[in-house]
Image: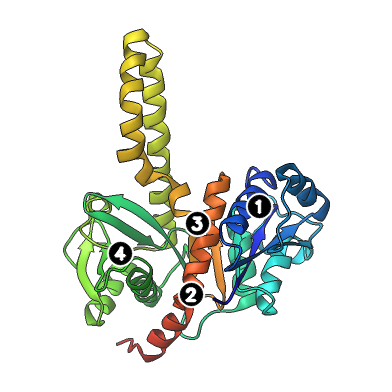
Amino acid sequence: MEKIRIVVDAMGGDFAPLNDVSGAIIAAEEKPDSLEIILSGKEKLIKEEILKHKVSLKNLTIVNAEEIVTMHDSPTESLKSKADSSISVGINLVKEKKADAFISAGNTGAVMTAAVLKLGRIAGVGRPTIGSLFPTDKGKTMVFDVGASVDCKAVHLLEFAVMGSIYMRNVHDIQNPRVGLLSVGEEKTKGDTLTIEANELLEKSNLNFIGNVEGRDVLSGKADIVICDGFVGNVILKFVESVLDVLKNKFRSYAAEGFLKKLWVGLISGTLKKVVLKDFDYQEYGGVPLLGVNGVVIIGHGKSSPIAIKNMIYKAEEIIRKNINAKISEELSSFEKK
């Protein structure tokens, strides 16, 4: 099996380089014959973290990058002013064919900007998209877009649906994914101008378009893919993430009211984590792919744990081995946008 070379942004995220290096080491140890991990970032800090693990891995290397893009940096400005950042250096390795993929839990806007400008877009893609998995009563739904493109045209939503369908078929084995368009009502005349125009394009497509869906349908499993612009999708994503925190705080507050309540919460906490909370845990899914760019880029949560970083690496490997980008290019090139 040919080794896949994956660059990890070692300076990305709230707990860098600790979690990034730890996650990379786990992946390198678990898959020594199939993965080569390249850590991009400040070499001195990365070496210090590796030494703590007391490991010597032939498939783990470092590429020095002295600058760090923070969460507060402007994506465009950081690309210009921080050419030696772990993001720029890492994505350049993909551009130069010295690596096959790049993953980061750092500044999402900076990663997307660098990926689009350095790697370019797949032919036929007007706007790249990122999708996020949501658990449902019947399995899972993926929402596209959740933040890559906040200002879209109808044709971009159609492209999201095409790329999302390819991804769900090949990665999640849903052969004929149902595509729903997020709107304020099920009738095709409901919604703003963007939604109405997108509905018309999707109806004419060869996708399994089931029509408009509403906010309550996202977690119901009515559609396998829900399409919206990145502004709306990002609001949904952040809202759902906040629900988990509210639930956890509610249980903590309840347990703090007395011994019996604490005991009851303790008894159900194991089941709650396995049955309910696990499905909402971003660590299980790792990161989300930036679809539509000429390279494999995975974007992770800023709070990514070592397990989440490891799963991001594995997600990148899966996308490469399943040749997702080539399939997107092939389908979009033959796709008739009526």
Contact check, label 2 and label 1, Cβ < 8 Å: no
* Kind of element beneath mark 4: strand
Q: Pick whichever of labels 2 and 1 is earlier in the sequence.
A: 1
Question: What's the mark number on residue 101?
Answer: none
Q: Where is residue 129 in the image (x, y as percent from the top left)?
A: 46, 68
Q: Position of residue 303 (x, y in %)?
A: 56, 44
Q: Pick whichever of labels 2 and 3 is earlier in the sequence.
A: 3
Dot 2, how many residues are within 10 Å of its Cα: few (below 14), some (14-19), or many (20+)? few
Residue picked out by circle 3:
287
User: Does residue 148 appear in the picture of this structure?
Assistant: no
Residue 32 or residue 130, whichever sits in front? 32
Residue picked out by circle 2:
321
Q: Quadrant of residue 242?
A: top left
Give the spatial CA distance, label 2 vs label 3: 17 Å
Give the spatial CA distance, label 2 vs label 4: 23 Å
Q: Pick whichever of labels 1 and 3 is earlier in the sequence.
A: 1
Residue picked out by circle 1:
12
Amino acid tagged 3: Gly
Q: Quadrant of the N terminus?
A: bottom right
Q: Position of residue 174 (x, y in %)?
A: 28, 68
Dot 1, how many residues are within 10 Å of its Cα: few (below 14), some (14-19), or many (20+)? many
Number of numbered callouts drawn: 4
Residue picked out by circle 4:
225
Give the spatial CA distance, label 4 vs label 1: 29 Å
Amino acid tagged 2: Arg
Image height of 203 relative to 149, above or below:
below
Q: Pick whichever of labels 4 and 1 is earlier in the sequence.
A: 1
Of badges 2 and 1, nearer the viewer stands: 2
* Left or right of residue 181: residue 55: right
Give the spatial CA distance, label 2 vs label 1: 25 Å
Image height of 133 relative to 241, above or below:
below
Image height of 306 relative to 35, above or below:
above
